[in-house]
Image (tube, rainbow, N blue to C red):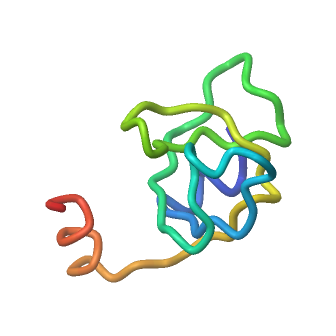
Amino acid sequence: MSELAATHQYVLCVSNKGNDLSVIKGKLYRVLPAEPNDRDHDLRVVDETGEDYLYDKSWFVPVTLSAAAIEKYEAA
């Protein structure tokens, strides 16, 4: 499992390299645990489709949210 995914459930998109419809720069995304065959440089992110896909880890920075913020984000 990716160290980033293991320690942070949410990330902020800082790059999308031509995938501007899948992930949006400046937007918060939920991270799911890596699956056995996922590459180390990828992150499993729930994107704009509502599904989880692999994206380059360098496109995101980890974000620590308060419990209240997580509750509101998950409810949205």
Residue 4, position as x, y percentages in the image? 68, 57
Viewed as shown, does residue 47 lie left or right of 14? left
Q: How many marks?
A: 0
Q: Where is residue 56 shown, x and y percent of the image?
A: 79, 46
Vertically, is 10 above or below 63?
above
Image quadrant holding the N terminus, namely: top right
- Left/right placement of residue 34 relative to residue 64 reads right
Q: Camera-side residue: 76 or 17?
A: 17
- In the displayed structure, does residue 20 sit left or right of residue 76? right
Q: Residue at x 69, y 63 (%)?
A: 60
Which residue ends up furthest to the top in the rendered image? 37
Vertically, is 52 above or below 8? above
Write down the quadrant of residue 72 in the picture: bottom left
Closest to the observer, 13 or 1:
13
Residue under the image location 75 percent in, 63 percent down: 15
Quadrant of the image for the C terminus? bottom left
User: Percent position (x, y) of residue 5?
Assistant: 61, 51
Q: Is residue 69 above or below residue 10?
A: below
Residue at 64%, 52% (x, y): give it: 20
Q: Residue at x 62, y 67 (%)?
A: 25
**Residue 49 x %, y %:** 41, 36
Residue 74 sits in quarter: bottom left
Which residue is nearer to you in this view: 33 or 20?
20
Q: Quadrant of residue 58?
A: bottom right
Q: 51 above or below 31? A: above
